[in-house]
Amino acid sequence: MKKSILMIILVCMISILFIGCNSKQETKKEPETKKEQPNENVNNKDDGDQIPDVELPRKGLIEAVKKLPEKKIKLSYLGYKNNEFWIPVEEGVLAAKEYLKNFNCDVEWVIMGEDINAENCIAAIETTITKKYDGFAIVPINDGTFEYMNKAVDRGIPVVSVIAEGSEKASGLIESKALAFMGTDAYAAGQQAGKLIEELTGGEGKIGVITGYFTAPQHEARRMGAVDYLEENCPDIDIIATVENQDDTLLAYSAAKDFFTKAPDLKLIYGCAGGAQGAAEAIKDLGLKGKAGLVCYDHIPVNIDYAREGYIWAALDQQPYENSFNALVYLYNNIVAGEEPPVDENGDIYVTPTVMTPDNVDELYPE
C-alpha cells in the first residue's frame, strides 16, 4: 500500500515537471514569433501610397522624385539680402522649403551678409561644411569661391550655384565641381540690353551706366556685353560716365542726378545690377518722363511699378524665384535618387531673359 502511494506521488511530480518545461518552452517561442511579424512602417516605406502627392506652387518648377530619403535631409541656400532683388529669391527658397518638407527634407535660408564679397561667401561655405548639411545652393558672385565650393563637393556635399558666379570657371582657371549653374548668360544678356538701348535711343545720344560692383564678374559681363554691342553698332551713342552703386538704390539715385547735371540731354541710363531703380526715381523726381528712361534687370515689384508709370523702358528678368526653387529640388533629387540636372556642356542651365516694357507690363503682370 505504501509503495502504491509513493508511485502515485512520483508520477504526479513527473507530470508537473513535464508541464512546466513545456510552458517555459512555449514562453520562449512567443517573442520569436513577434520578431517574425512584419514591420509595416519599414516594409511600406517605398510604397507609392506613402510618397506625398504635392502640387508645385507655380509653373516652370521642377518636381521632386517619387522616392523618399532614408533619413531627413538638410539643405541650405546661401544668398544675400541688400536690395529688393533678393525678395523673389527668398520667396523661391521659402516655397521650396514648404514643398520639400513633405519629402522629409528641411531647407534653411542663410543670408551671407549685406556686403557682397568673396570673404562672406567663403565663410558661409565653411560654416555649411562644418554643420554637415547634405547639400546647398549658393550665389557665388565673386571670384575666389570655386575652391571652397569644390572643397564641399569633395566632402560629399553636392552644390548648385545660382544667379551669378565668379569668372574662374568661364576663364578656365578652375574646374567647377558643382552639379550646375542656374541663371542667365550675363554677357549675352548685356548684348540683349545693348540692342534694347539702340532701339530706345534710335542709336544716338548720351547715356550713363550704373553697375553694381566692378569686382562682380556678372555685373561686368552685363556691362561689357552692352558696351561692346553699342561700340560695334552705335557709334553715335556717347557713354558719358560709368559708376558703381554697390547694389544700393540711394547711390543709384544720386548717380542718376549727377548724370543729368552733367548732361541735361541724357536720353537713357543703363543699370547693370541691383538697386538700379533708384535711377528711375531720379528720372521721376526730375520730371523727365518720356524724355529719359532706364534699362535694367529684374521684374521685382518696384520695377513693375516703374514700368507701368513709364520710367523703366525695359527690364530683363533673371527668374530668381524659379531658379532658387529648382536648385534646391535638383539637390534633393540628386541626393535621393542620383539624378543629374540637365546641364549643357559647360555645366550650365541658362534661362532666356523676358523683357518687360511699359507696353507689355500689364500683360505680364496683371494688377
Image: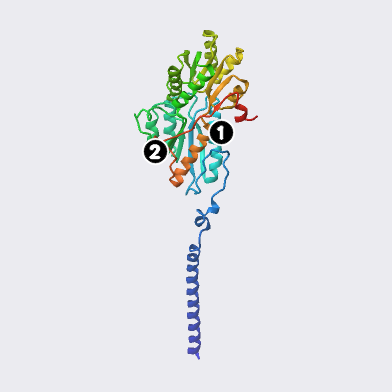
Q: Is residue 167 left or right of residue 40?
A: left
The amino acid sitting under disc 2 is: Val
Quadrant housing residue 231? top left
Q: Is residue 166 left or right of residue 326?
A: left
Q: Earlier in the sequence, mark 1 or mark 2?
A: 1
Front residue of 153 and 126: 153
The picture places residue 79, in percent across and down from the top left corner, at: 49, 30
Labels 1 and 2 touching (C-beta < 8 A): no
Dot 2: element? helix
Tell me if mark 2 has few (under 14), some (14-19) or many (20+) residues whose alpha carbon lies within 10 angstroms of its own. Answer: some
Q: Is residue 288 above or below residue 299?
A: above
Front residue of 173 and 19: 173
Q: CA distance from mark 1 to mark 2?
A: 26 Å
Front residue of 302 and 187: 187
The amino acid sitting under disc 1 is: Glu
Q: Is residue 294 left or right of residue 153?
A: right
Residue position for label 2: 153
The picture places residue 35, in percent across and down from the top left corner, at: 48, 62
Q: Visible in this render: residue 272?
A: no
Which residue occupies 50% across, 72% down?
23
Residue position for label 1: 91
The residue at the far left in this view is 173
Q: Is residue 224 left or right of residue 365?
A: left
Tell me if mark 1 has few (under 14), some (14-19) or many (20+) residues whose alpha carbon lies within 10 angstroms of its own. Answer: some
Q: Is residue 178 above or below residue 17?
A: above
Dot 1: element? helix
